[in-house]
Image (cartoon, rainbow, N blue to C red):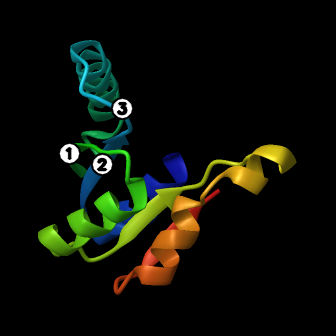
Amino acid sequence: MREFFTWVNPLKSKVCVLQVIQGDYRHETEAELRCSQSEIKDFYGDEISLQFDTIWSNEVASSIHSYMLRTESDALVLCSKHHGFIQGLFHKSVTKVLSAIARYPVFVFH
């Protein structure tokens, strides 16, 4: 994340961290999210304007795409997760799906 914030800080960008949670809503998960958000704000909050949104959905790529269109965001930044060979055969890449359908810039940090 440090790379990303170093990149956007000079632009004085407003950053929205979108967390997409698969599965049903759970109060415990919501509490964990709030804790993570607080830590991120404590660490980066003085450097940049941060906002957090959460989506509960099993359709990760389409939910992110819908969010981007609804909020008219300027760009999407994704952090990629590396999968092993076998897992990669069966894993549907959110990055690949969004790159194929996006009408907005998509940046991927590895």
Residue 76 or residue 42, whichever sits in front: 76
Secondary structure under tag 2 reads strand
Considering only order in the chain, which callout, 3 or 1, is on the residue closer to the N terminus?
3
Considering only order in the chain, which callout, 3 or 2, is on the residue closer to the N terminus?
2
Q: Amino acid at mark 2?
A: Val
Q: Is residue 12 shown to the viewer in this render?
A: no
Residue 32 or residue 89, whichever sits in front: 89
Q: Residue at x 77, y 55 (%)?
A: 89
In this rendering, is residue 9 above or below 2? below
Q: Residue at x 31, y 20 (%)?
A: 29
Residue 6: give its label. Answer: none
Q: Label 1 vs label 2: CA separation? A: 6 Å
Secondary structure under tag 1 reads strand
Of circles 2 and 3, the one toward us is 2
In this rendering, is residue 13 above or below 51? below
CB atoms of marks 2 and 3 within 8 Å: no
User: Residue at label 1?
Assistant: 53
User: Residue at label 3?
Assistant: 43
Give the image location of residue 71, x and y in percent: 14, 68
Give the image location of residue 61, x and y in percent: 41, 61
Q: Label 1 vs label 3: CA separation? A: 18 Å
Q: Residue at x 59, y 60 (%)?
A: 93
In this rendering, is residue 39 above or below 84? above
Q: Amino acid at mark 3?
A: Phe
Considering only order in the chain, which callout, 2 or 1, is on the residue closer to the N terminus?
2
Residue 17: give its label. Answer: 2
Give the image location of residue 21, x and y in percent: 35, 37
CB atoms of marks 1 and 3 within 8 Å: no
Q: Residue at x 25, y 41 (%)?
A: 46
